[in-house]
Amino acid sequence: MFLSASLPSFTAVLLGLLSPKSLAFTAGHYSKLRTPSTSAPAAVGIFHFGNSAHSRILSWAHINPSCDDSEEFSAPKLSGNGHAHSRRSMLHTASMSFAGTVSSGPLAALLRSLGDEPEAGGCKSRANRNVANAMGLVRFPCPPGTLMNTYHLIRAGESGYEANDVLITNPLFLTNREDALTDLGIIQVEEACNEMMSKGMNPSVVKYSLAAKCIDTVNIMATNMMIGRNRIVPEFTFMDQRQAGLWDGKPLSTTEPAMFALDATEAGKEGRDGRPPANEDGTANETLYDQVVRLRQLMSILETQYSGDEIVLVFPDGGSPALLSCLIAGIPLNKCHALNFAPGEIRFNVNMENSLKLLDEKISSPEYNDAVTMGNEQLVALRTAPVEEEEKNFVDPSPSATAETVAIKPSKQSELAKALAADGQKEIPGSPDFFSFWALGAAGS
């Protein structure tokens, strides 16, 4: 059942229903309607609002398309008892009648045409109606007014691995206490807390990675800033840093600039290229785009769960928040390392405008350009290194590590266990007992 008529006539009916006086259609009355000429007959439904719960169409009047704009026609007489009804009753019955009409049929096409916008050629087309515009599904870049929350990004303070110049990107190792904050890292986080408190910040949500240094960071924030534990939310996967594949476990001071150079020269605007060599110990070799997928999921979840909140995101490395800043601002991803975060650094209200302004300052800075220049040299050295050098075991960077305490990669442990068994030893040096207090994860940070 549908109603198709000229817009003025339809408006007149609605105004009549909304008028202060009650409106009634009685038997013997006629309706005078005007309709413009059309290329096809227009059907006008005459409704009777009687005692029944639903309105019904009694008759249809067809307009001759050859008639001019001034032609009038009379609707047939209506049957019924002629009782008058209140405005509320008729609004109820009218809404039931018009509900299906608005969603389908010729009237729906008329309403859609009113929302069409002219294109450059002067022709009208249907306005873009993409379901991806729904709140919560984040699409990068994010122009002003797109995000529902305010985001402040912080990198955790210096960790034990970083202090010992070791690049660790495998999430399995990042949960170890060797990745906990050093004394300098604690000071860096406390300074960031003081900076937040000086600005009067009281975040409603603190989202953090499960890396040991991030857990330490949020514990300090909770204590110093009086943040309740109900507002501290862990993130298990989507805030993991980019994994370096075969370069995992190498010196941080030389490998990180090499990855800067790799991305600057090979990653491309979308970060789909520039993949480190593969590893066999379970450490993934990821491109920037692999991390983009995780960050998009992170932001979509936050935009779905919260609205109008101040959210602090605690990342384990400096590249992840820099990459997120580029995604929000629409910056080519091969430039993301220009926005790299230092340990303990916090940036407030990260949005498109602030990120673009900061990029103009950082992209030409001597620090970034020197790092890329050195990285190009280190990248050549990494790629030409012998295979034997790539497979060397790395020394445990913890302060308590000794010559006998060596962190052995998982792929090497089975061979070492056989060798130790031949020598009469039962345990691999540096590996905890499976039933030990630490192995069960019962100890806190």
Image (spheres, helix red, strand yellow):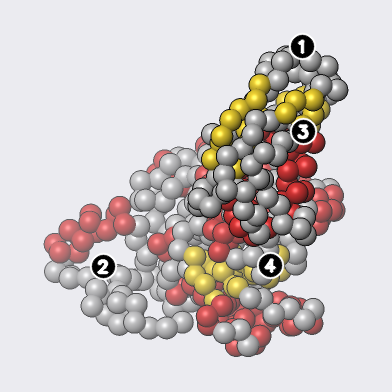
Q: Nearer the viewer, residue 348 or 62?
A: 62
Amino acid type, residue under disc 3 in the picture: Lys
Element on which disc 1 rests: loop
Residue 162 in percent (x, y) is at 57, 66
| Left or right: 162 in relation to 70 | left
Q: CA distance from mark 4 to mark 1?
A: 58 Å
Indicate which disc, 2 or 3, sits on the residue closer to the N terminus: 3
| Position of 442 relative to 37 (above/below) | below
Circle 2 Cα neighbour tier, 10 Å, few/some/many (<14 / 14–19 / ≥20)? some
Indicate which disc, 4 or 1, sits on the residue closer to the N terminus: 1
Q: Nearer the viewer, mark 4 or mark 1?
A: 1
Indicate which disc, 4 or 2, sits on the residue closer to the N terminus: 4
In the rendered structure, find residue 32 and report the number of the disc placed on it.
Answer: 3
**Residue where numbered disc 4 is placed:** 308
Residue 193, quarter of the rendered image: bottom right
Element on which disc 2 rests: loop
Element on which disc 3 rests: strand
Q: In the image, what residue occupies the spot 80% across and 36% down?
A: 8
Q: CA distance from mark 1 to mark 3?
A: 19 Å
Amino acid type, residue under disc 4 in the picture: Gly
**Residue where numbered disc 2 is placed:** 428
In the rendered structure, find residue 108 and report the number of the disc placed on it.
Answer: none
